[in-house]
Image (cartoon, rainbow, N blue to C red):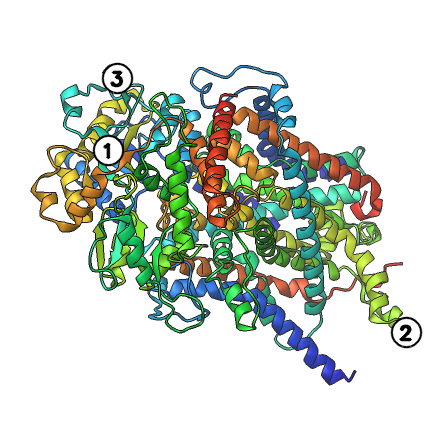
Amino acid sequence: MSPTLKKVLWHAAMIVVVLITMYPVLQIFSISLRPGDQLYSTSLDLIPEGASLESFRTILFEKPFLRWLGNSLLVALSTAILGVTLASTAAYALSRFRLPGQKGILFAILTTQMFPATMLLLPMYLLMRNLGLVNSLVGVILAYTATALPFCIWTMKGYYDTIPRSLEEAAMIDGMTEVGAFWRVTLPLSAPALVITFLFSFLAGWSEFIVARTLIVSRELNTLPLGLESLATTFQTEWANYAAGSLLVAVPVVALFLGLSKFLVEGLTHGGVKG
Amino acid sequence: MSRRGAIALFLIPSALVMGLIVLWPFVYNLWLSMTNLGLYTIKDGPDFVGFAQYLRLFGEPDLYEYLLRTLIWTGINVVFHVVIGVGLALALNQKFTGRAFYRGLLILPWALPQYIAALSWRGMFNFEYGQINLLLGSIGMDPVPWLSTEVGAFAAALITNIWLGFPFMMVVALGGLQSIPKEMYEAADIDGAGSWWRLRHITIPLLRPVMMPAIVLGTIWTFNNLNVIWLVTNHGEPADSSHILVTYVYKAAFVYYRYGYAAAFGVLIFLILLVLTWMNYRQADKSAYGA
Amino acid sequence: MMKHRAHLPTVLGLVLAIGVVACGPSRDDPNRLTVWEQMDPAEQAMLREHLDMFEDEHPGVRVDVVHFETENLRQNFQTAALAGTGPDLVYGPSDGVGPYSIMGLIYELEDPRLNIHPDTLALYLPDALPKVNGKTYRISDQIGNHLTLVRNGAFAPDAPMTMEELIRVAKENTIDEDGDGRPDRWGLVFNLAEPFWLIPFLGGYGGWVMDESEHPTLDSEAMVGALALVRRFIDEGIIPPSCDYPLSDTLFKQGKAAFIINGPWSWQGYRDVGIDVRLSSIPRIPETGLWPSPSTASKGYSMNIHVPETRLDLVVDLMMFLTSADVVGRLSDRIGALPSRIDVGNWPRVANNPELAASWEQLRRGRQMPLVPEMRAIWDVMRPGMQRVVSGSATPEEAAQRMQEDALRKIEEMKL
């Protein structure tokens, strides 16, 4: 097969995949354009009759969208920073220090994810109430970090395991401390894993609804998912505004991903030490 | 700083956060599962009933059907998530024009709020007016009764969840591909290896350490994923036949107020996942878990 | 990525500081009240107006409102109240009262600590004071929530008087304009996926969900009749078989349906997109001569059992204010809600407004849903039963029988 044909076919395949991925997104866009809050449509038209961008204007300027955005940014960024910090350090200890009972610890971390979340809400509420953290963003951040940590620790550890220990040992021979070696040698090489961890923790804090709904009860603290919920009642929902809001909610995430993917895709060499 | 000090500094904060936030609710549920806390016992306090709720649970006739459906649901989802995710990561790992554009678009299913995405998909599966049947009709095929049949509804929820879940695996795979040194591929090229060989003998084995956490946890999360099935099948359409284990727990707790029973159910789900993961842990290549 | 660790203490400190500030005022503050609600946007706006009025009359007092979607409100209120906290007043439909009262989460309004005089309560319509075991647990500011027959005046100018007439007109209005084998306009649309829409027909055939001793009566001839009627709509081709709420809503809004059965929360939305909305009662069932009875509910305020002593009187004041003649009247005038008070009701306000009059007529033919927790089980079994009949996998007789068996079983299980 000629290289050009290969290239064309490949691009065609990619376009098909992207179209399939994008189609539901375009549906949501249609909802935001449709007058009268119609969730379903009755035709294949993507641009509905009477389309207008009114819903975007409404959600941005007539609803406290910017406040929701601010709260969500605070929560998601804090979760991400906290998650990366705690996971990158804990995983390092597990990867490098061969602690006794290590397999057990790793497995135990995993088990924290196995309990169905719906049953954890009431005790979590009780706990937060006793800590005085109900209706505060700190409580929510802690809860999100705790649920994101297992994945982050395991991922960081898996990545560290592909980096030879000899690199840190060489640095320590040159006079660095363990912590210094971690900071200067290991972390930079782990950039792709840090990106995954950061993105994952950010999204854990950005799009979560149930825990936020249970812990936050005052309007000023509404995060984006909670804010969007305020557009819904049992049967009637302001679908156009909801759809517009949902699309806007996705924008920072895409921007973050694109910004971080520089570290995700550019290959990093390991200095040819791998033997 | 001493080695011990470093270890402590590195481990304790994580242990604290996870212990507090996850361990306590779990212990609470263990206690709850041995009581009969329900609508009529909340006011004056529940009684301790030992293992009665568990016995009741095992006597539940539909339990095994829900378990089977949950296993099938989880299995199919994870397979598709991983295959699509890794495939796309391989494609996006090469340099080509417009790569950033594709990347940005392909992450959208993960970036959008699940609620409206799931409901929007539900609309697309509508028999008369959903886009999927309309598209099938435009190429001359018969419309599929998605949501009014058991298999159709299950398929609809599956398709929706696959769409929602592959970007995550794609991102993890993209990161994992970076840990594979270029020299390995160069050496293989020198030996004249084809791309299929490279995939089987270099990419996949070296991708495993980074993908394993995502796959294991992805399996656990999918097993316990309530939202998508609930929203796409409108609480279990048709006629309560789409339930998996967690949707049943949700109903027990929040529709029927049977908190004690639901807690026991939660513990059961936990044990099932524990056993499944443990079995996999022993079997799989230990190095994949980095032990 | 590398710099973050150095800034970590700063970030954590900042986050904690914000958290403390965001923690909110002390629970016992006698001047800070909270209300949780699940209102429509129009109602929310009016609530804020009324609360501003209340605050003006009580200087120094602040009332905070938090909005939830109905199911979330139910769960969150439960969680909070079980933990000993929660809002002072919770606003919602009357069916919340059953479980809350049994769990001991809300005040009985006859409780002497509240100082509510029986004469005050006598000013409300009976339906506006949901009772469990003879005790009142809520005061409503509106009654309604009743499904009504809504027609598009352009297609069906007159109100059908009997079910047969409705079906006939609906058939005339099911038209395939472009000849592709699929109707472009449907005669009738409504939510086939939720038993709430089955209830009117159940009443129309002379049945109900339970008897006076709260025993389910789901395998009655009336239930079979109701299910058969729904099946008939589908067989006559006047309704799309996959019609759920969003689809019925969309079709009617797009002018692709002649009749829709929907409740008061939706009517303004149809008017807003230019549909010529006309209301009438769901027409009589010829076989029984009865009018279909949609379920009616009231929406109102209950008091959290955990309201601290320091605020008790103020909270009672607020509750009575929000259900006073003045406020109820304004709600009725501005958003067309049917009033909950006798002194505001009947009466020129309603009679002079044709829309309200039609709505009121349907409401009078409606029937209040029982408030007991057993209803949760009953709704839960009616849903799959109705779906089975709609999808054709069971006959009405089979579905009704199964509903009854399942309901009895689930009610027993609720006690475990």
Q: Are marks 3 and 2 on the same chain?
A: no
Quadrant in which the N terminus of chain B appears? top right
Q: Secondary structure at mark 1?
A: strand
Identify the mark at residue B192; answer none if there is no mark: 2
Disc 3: host chain? C
Identify the mark at residue C140; answer none if there is no mark: 1
Residue C172: name its quadrant.
Answer: bottom left
Image spot of residue C24 (x, y percent)? 37, 36
Q: Nearer the viewer, residue C26 or C116?
A: C116
Q: In the picture shown, does residue B47 fall above or below C35?
A: above
Q: Nearer the viewer, residue A236 or C243?
A: C243
Residue displayed at 54% across by 39% down: A142
Q: Name the amino acid, label 1.
A: Ser
Image spot of residue B132 (x, y percent)? 53, 64
Crowd tier of the residue under label 1, counting other residues whose Cα lies within 10 Å: few below 14, some 14–19, many 20 or above? many
Q: Name the amino acid, label 3.
A: Asp
Q: Name the amino acid, label 2.
A: Gly
Distance between mark 3 and mark 2 Cα atoms? 88 Å
Q: Which residue is mark 3?
A: C111
